[in-house]
Image (cartoon, grey):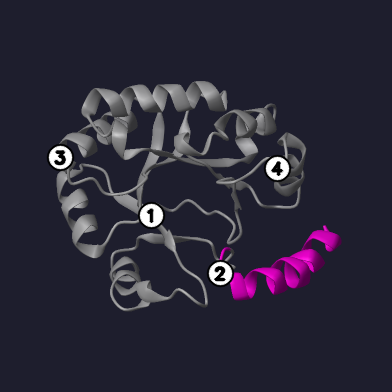
């Protein structure tokens, strides 16, 4: 896309810290904030970016339950309202749905770009085959795929990562520190993450 964002962003999937820590993160250079309608955190992101909207790159996601054409449009409008902004920088399909034709969903995503409500479109948790199908149905380029990727979970390196590199699709890694893996959780949260938090 030509858009430059920092390598470290702020994910708010299980966030409950209020707007101030997010604003602090933005002030330290973490200007990419990633949320989703299903996270229930778009409101707090909206509070955090009030007055600094032009400094922040906002990514959010539409849930598969809303992949029908009209539902995608409505979901985007609701996200825009909760975020308190007139545009979503990156709007992502949260996962693939085999229940709704991808062409219908991508048609709505293209419409959102045409209407200026969305700048770029992306996907999340899509395989190579699913990405090919989605891109074939879309007029606009899919610029990103958000997937689980860390030192423990590296399955994307076999097929998905090479495909994305070849087609200039950005990988957005979620759970990059493998949080949730019991044998690592204590060491990561009490060790490296504690050190990082203390330094901030």
> Residue 115, located in which quarter of the rendered image?
top left
| Residue 49 percent coordinates (x, y) | 66, 33
Q: Residues within 10 Å of mark 1 (few under 14, many from 20)?
A: many
In this picture, is 17 found above or below 108?
A: below
- The residue tagged 2 is 181
Instruction: List the residue tagged with mark 1.
Output: 144
CA separation in Å, label 3 and label 2: 36 Å
Circle 3 SS class: helix
Would you name the residue on which mark 3 appears? 103
Image quadrant in which the C terminus is located? bottom right
Q: Earlier in the sequence, mark 4 or mark 3?
A: 4
Kindly report the distance in space between the C-alpha atoms of the residues bearing marks 3 and 1. Answer: 18 Å
Q: Which residues are magenta?
A: 180-200
- Which residue was labeled with disc 4? 22
Local packing at callout 3 (Cα closer than 10 Å; few below 14, some 14-19, many 20+) is: some
Q: CA distance from mark 1 to mark 2?
A: 25 Å
**Which residue is drawn at the image coordinates 23% and 45% (left, top)?**
97
Mark before the other along the chain sequence, 2 or 4: 4
Indicate whether residue 167 is drawn in magenta.
no
| Mark positioned earlier in the residue sequence (3 or 2) | 3
Sequence-first tag of 1 and 4: 4
Label 4 vs label 3: CA separation?
Answer: 36 Å
Question: Is residue 182 on the magenta stretch?
Answer: yes
């Amino acid at each position: 896309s030509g858009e430059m964002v920092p390598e470290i962003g702020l994910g708010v999937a299980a966030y409950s810290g209020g707007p101030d820590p997010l604003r602090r993160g933005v002030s330290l250079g973490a200007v990419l904030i990633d949320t989703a309608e299903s996270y229930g955190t778009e409101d707090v992101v909206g509070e955090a970016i009030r007055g600094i909207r032009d400094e922040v790159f906002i990514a959010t996601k539409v849930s598969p339950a809303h992949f029908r054409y009209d539902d995608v449009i409505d979901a985007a409008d609701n996200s825009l309202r909760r975020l308190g902004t007139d545009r979503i920088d990156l709007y992502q399909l949260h996962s693939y749905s085999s229940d709704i034709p991808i062409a219908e969903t991508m048609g709505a995503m293209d419409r959102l770009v045409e209407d200026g409500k969305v700048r770029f479109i992306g996907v999340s948790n899509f395989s190579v085959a699913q990405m090919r199908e989605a891109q074939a149905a879309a007029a606009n380029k899919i610029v990103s795929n958000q997937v689980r990727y860390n030192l423990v979970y590296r399955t994307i390196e076999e097929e998905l990562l090479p495909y994305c590199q070849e087609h200039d699709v950005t990988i957005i890694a979620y759970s990059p520190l493998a949080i949730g893996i019991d044998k690592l959780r204590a060491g990561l949260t009490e060790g490296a993450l504690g050190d990082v938090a203390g330094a901030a």
